[in-house]
Amino acid sequence: MTVVVIFNIFFALLLGMIIAMQFLLQRTLHRSLYYYRNAVFIAGILFLSMLMLSLYSYLLSCLMETKELTLRYLFIEFVRFPKRFSVFAIPLFTVICLIISISNLALIRHEGLRLKNILGVVLGILVIGGTVAIHAASSLVESQILTREGILGNPYFVALHTYLNLFLLLMMCYFECFFLGTVVMAYLAARQKPRYDKDFIIILGCSIDKKGGLRPLLKARTNRAIRYAWDQEIATGKPVTYIPSGGQGEDEIMSEGSAMELYLLAHGAESEEVHAEKRSRNTYENFLFSKQIIDELNPEAKVCFATTNYHMFRSGVLAKRVGLDAEGIASRTKWYFWPNGFVREFFAILDLQKKEHLLATGIIFAGCFILAIFALIFRLKA
């Protein structure tokens, strides 16, 4: 009877999580996509759903085989779950890293060997290499250390090994789930189609060539902004004011904002339709200084921004930080560039929210420590 009750509880929890994830994702599509918590939410739902599914399958096996179910065995299944999750994730991340690594080879061929051009290899080492290393180290400790006389029967050493290993595996699961959550949000953000009701369009800058011309990446962003402005004016008759945004780098003869301004004027824009922002040094400052221009011209304006597809999600998050409720317009790039570009964005998002990730690490560590204490007390009493 107890098995049936617990079985029904876990089934209801699993079904509830799946419905909640579908509902909240649909709700997200009708609101802003650019909330960092969306990626966190998807990561959490993914992990908890897999956990519930694992425990549900264990309960089902108990029911089918009429095995005795106790809280002790359920607790053991919970502790074993991160190890299983990390093993099951290896094939998925192997495929992902292989695809990114292939794009890295093409990228190196076109742009040369640089650290930022081998991020697919770095990701593969972190995820696949890290998982294999944790499992190998755990097996080594179990076979070479815990089997020694005086240690095997010591519950303190066993608990320390078990829950340190659990902490490392949970951190790997955390990293993997957050990566997949970011992938989902980046995909949704890149496919967003803004409404034709905007007053301003911010064009996010990137490097220009030695003569002040737009490189392919920046030209694609600017052309995408021009196309959107034309489409909006045709559809609604409402014109858009351009804000090309970007400062001057040490190796650039002019600011990126000025270079885009000249390009826009040469492609039909009137001088009063272009207000260049020429001070920013990064994406955050792109939005911060552009917002200052917008607030001076029209504080109630509706805004969108143009950037490359892989850059959309992080850009939207940064726009939120400066108080801009903006929609994004994605420009495309070469097939071999965007996978590596996305990985670079992912690491940038990790750094962007490092305090939150450090807090999560502390919570996971504290949880593992508490589990170790409870398990140790249970064993001592037993």
Image: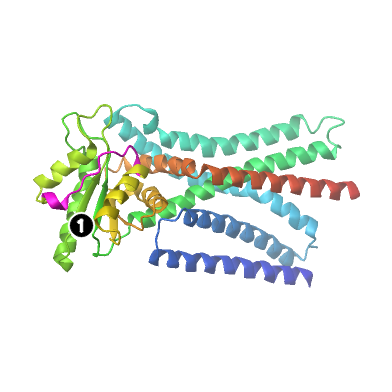
Count of labels in the image:
1
Q: Residues within 10 Å of mark 1 (few under 14, many from 20)?
A: many
Residue assigned mark 1: 228
What residue is at 35 percent from the left and 47 percent from the top?
288
Give the camera-side residue of 184 and 33. Answer: 33
Q: Is residue 270 left or right of residue 168?
A: left
When the figure is inspected, residue 158 is found, relative to residue 5, above or below; the finding is above
Q: Position of residue 8 (x, y in %)?
A: 68, 71
Looking at the rendering, the stretch of residues picked out in magenta corresponds to: 271-283
Q: Position of residue 281 (x, y in %)?
A: 33, 37
What residue is at 64 percent from the left and 44 percent from the top?
362
When the figure is inspected, residue 16 is found, relative to residue 96, above or below; the finding is below
What residue is at 40 percent from the left and 65 percent from the top?
31
When the figure is inspected, residue 125 is found, relative to residue 363, above or below; the finding is above
Q: Is residue 229 left or right of residue 106?
A: left
Q: Residue furthest front?
A: 296
Q: Is residue 329 left or right of residue 167?
A: left
Hey, what amino acid is under mark 1? Answer: Tyr
